[in-house]
Image: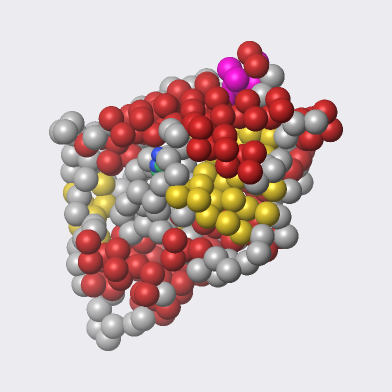
Amino acid sequence: MRILVTGGAGFIGSAVCRHLVGEGDFVLNVDALTYAGNLKSLRAIENQPNYAFLQADIRDEETILDAMRANDIDAVMHLAAESHVDRSIDGPDIFLQTNVIGTFRMLSAGRYWAELPADRREAFRFHHVSTDEVYGDLPFDSGIFTEETPYKPSSPYSASKAASDHLARAWCHTYGLPTVLSNCSNNYGPFHFPEKLIPLVTLNALDGRDLPVYGEGQNVRDWLFVEDHARALEAVIKKGAPGETYNIGGRSERTNIDVVRTICAILDDERPRPGKSYADQITFVTDRPGHDRRYAIDPTKIETELGWKARETFESGLRKTIRWYLGNDWWWAPIRETDKGERRGRGHVE
Ligand code: NAD
């Protein structure tokens, strides 16, 4: 397929580009290269004949439309977004601009689909990549998100993603644009920007710095290895039915404090320091305002209907991730120079 991927210089988008190019699809990566975009994440494929990059803003509808026409695109996988909850608490404006208006412009450019001959129009997909955070939070001891769970977003980030999900569904219902949606749990893996929990804790541990855990660390997230997610997104865009939604998760619920302790245990093993454990650096800090207690994804639909299943357990994926950070400071050290992992999201809107 000839796939236009937005946000392909980001964490998940770059894993998707590497995966699809490896599968032989043509990928046009459209990315504005914000603070979160990094072309170094695409080093492995940048010279491949079936990969191309266009620096553009998803809000620039005409440029996106021209790119679809010029590259004979069969499908769009839309990942570009502002993605960090703590940043959305400090400055929600850009989240509405990018996630809501940006998705609206992408859907408008999707009118390209109507120009295609009948057989290609039939096969065309506009895949909107979203998050399980649109469902709000669950009690600690019960409940799971299915595709039928009502939306109840808590943060400016998740509210903006919820709005963009509704737009994608409305474009299918109103204009017939063949949209498919996926809502995914927390990803982790190589090339993850070091402001997010797992890389932040790993790199702070190696630096001998505090390992900040919000509240008492009892919040639960359901973790998915990013390369499992990339394969799931490929299944959705190639086999998903228009108008459908697929929840994607790795059946790996963990409390935040468990995640941090597991990282410390793996580092004690991989990079031991005599007489000391990395766990000694754990510190508890004031909780994030509006912090959702628990997310848990039921991935039964994608498993049964599209034949996808996560391959990594949390422990195997986490060890791979930590080994990647230990061996790839060329990627993360320049980012840490400018972004020192200071606390964001205390609740003061800029
Ligand atoms: P990321 O922040 O790592 O990357 C986002 C990318 O989008 C960056 O490369 C950035 O340059 C680009 N971008 C931002 N604004 C843009 C604009 N206006 N025009 C063009 N490009 C722009 O994000 P991620 O973690 O890879 O997440 C990708 C998608 O998956 C997002 O839509 C996010 O909501 C969703 N998602 C993420 C997770 C997760 O755990 N990271 C979980 C579920 C869903």
Q: Quadrant of residue 338?
A: bottom left
Location of residue 76 with respect to 245 vertically, above or below: below
Residue sitting at x 55%, y 66%: 46
Q: Quadrant of residue 311?
A: bottom right
Main secondary structure found in the magenta portion: helix
Location of residue 137 with respect to 22 vertically, above or below: above
User: Relative to 220, is 113 on the left or the right?
Assistant: right
Quadrant, the C terminus: top left
The percent position of residue 113, horizontal first and vertical second, equals: 69, 29
Location of residue 64 with respect to 189 vertically, above or below: above
The percent position of residue 22, horizontal first and vertical second, equals: 67, 63
Residue 184 shows in this picture: no
Residue 239 shows in this picture: yes
Residue sitting at x 39%, y 65%: 263
Where does ligand 1 appear, by image quarter?
top left
The percent position of residue 215, horizontal first and vertical second, equals: 24, 44
Residue sitting at x 32%, y 52%: 35
Residue sitting at x 53%, y 37%: 64
Q: Is residue 90 magenta?
A: no
Judging depth in this view, the residue of 340 and 228 nearest the camera is 340
Q: What are the residue bounds of the magenta stretch?
A: 168-173
Q: Quadrant of residue 74?
A: top right
